[in-house]
Image (cartoon, grey):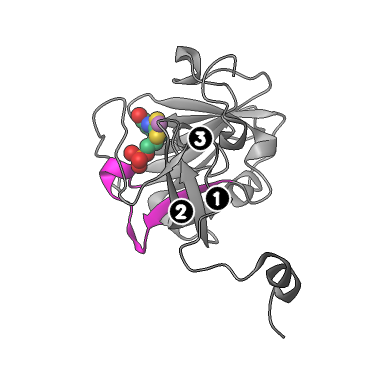
Amino acid sequence: MSEGFISRGFRGRRKPGDTSGRLPPGQYLEDGFPVLSAGPTPHTKLSAWDFSIVGKVDQPKRWSWDEFRALPRETVTKDIHCVTKWSKLDTHWEGVSLDTLLSQVTYDASYALALSDGGYTTNLPLQEVLGGQAWVVDTYEGQPLEPQHGGPARLLVPHLYFWKSAKWVRGLRLIKQDEPGFWESLGYNNHGDPWKEERYWGD
Ligand SMILES: Nc1nc2c(c(=O)[nH]1)N[C@H]1C(S)=C(S)[C@@H](COP(=O)(O)O)O[C@H]1N2
Ligand SMILES: [Mo]
C-alpha cells in the first residue's frame, strides 16, 4: 500500500529538498554546522567520563562510558534550530533517550538542570524531555560526535532552540522548582520554543 496516499493526494507530492513548513519563523537554512560555544572546548577522556543523575532522586545514578554505551540506543533524524537564526534539517544522531536514563531512577522532581563540563547549564521541564523528545547523543552522521560539537556526548532536545542541547553534558540535576541555566539567566527565554519564537526574556 502506498504510504501517506491520502495526505499526498491532498497536498501534492513533496519534491525532494522541499522544506516548506519546516523552518520556524525568522530562521534561515544552514548547510554547514556552525560551532557556538560560550567557552573553550573541554577534552574529557572516555576513561574519566561518566553521566550522572543527581538531585531529587532516591539514589543518585551514575554510568561510566562503557555502561552508557551498553544502554538501549536510538537513531533519530531531526531538524535543529539555533536562536542565532540558523536551522539545519534532517540531522542524524545516535544515543540514549532521556526516557531510558530517567527510567533507571526513582525521583520526585519536575525540572532538570543539565550539567556540562566547563560549567554550562540549561534548564528543562521533565515533561519536555520525556516521551521521545530528548537524547544524550554521542554519534552525529554516523561518526563519533566531534569535541567542538559536544563530544563525547551532548544533549539533543530538537524541539527547543539549540542552546538547550547542552554540549559536553555529564549529568542531570533533578529539581522541584525551575532554575534558569546559563543563557536563561543572561536574558534568553526560559522555555525556547522556536515555533513560538521564544528567543529572549519576555518573548
Ligand atoms: N556546554 C555548552 N553547551 C552548549 C553551548 C555552550 O556554549 N556550552 N552553546 C549552546 C548553543 S547557544 C548552541 S546554538 C549549541 C551549538 O551547538 P554546535 O556548536 O554544535 O552548533 O550548543 C549549545 N550547547
Ligand atoms: Mo545558540
Q: Secondary structure at mark 2?
A: strand
The earlier-in-sequence mark between 1 and 3 is: 1
Q: Amino acid at mark 2?
A: Leu
Q: Amino acid at mark 1?
A: Arg
**Location of the C terminus (image quadrant):** top right
Q: How many marks overall?
A: 3
Q: Nearer the viewer, mark 1 or mark 2?
A: 1
**Where's residue 144, x and y in %?**
32, 57
Q: Is residue 37 above or below residue 12?
A: above
Would you name the residue on which mark 1 appears? 22
**Location of the N terminus (image quadrant):** bottom right
Would you name the residue on which mark 3 appears? 161
Residue 150 appears anywhere in the view: no
Query: In the drawing, does residue 106 fall left or right of residue 98?
Result: right
Counting other residues with Cα less than 10 Å from the Cα at mark 2, is it few (<14), some (14-19), or many (20 or more)?
some
Res 89 label: 2
The earlier-in-sequence mark between 3 and 2 is: 2
Q: CA distance from mark 3 to mark 2?
A: 14 Å
Q: CA distance from mark 1 to mark 3?
A: 14 Å
Q: Is 61 in the magenta?
A: no
**Where's residue 157, x and y in %?**
53, 42
Identified at 39% across, 52% down, the residue is 138
Q: Amino acid at mark 3?
A: Tyr
The reply to whether the residue tagged 3 has its Cβ within 8 angstroms of ligand 2 is yes
Counting other residues with Cα less than 10 Å from the Cα at mark 1, is it few (<14), some (14-19), or many (20 or more)?
some
Q: For the magenta stretch, what is the residue range?
A: 134-152
Query: In the drawing, does residue 38 fall left or right of residue 160?
Result: left
Q: CA distance from mark 1 to mark 2?
A: 8 Å
Q: Is there CB contact under 8 Å for labels 1 and 2?
A: yes
Q: Nearer the viewer, mark 3 or mark 2?
A: 2
Identified at 27% across, 25% down, the residue is 39
Res 184 label: none
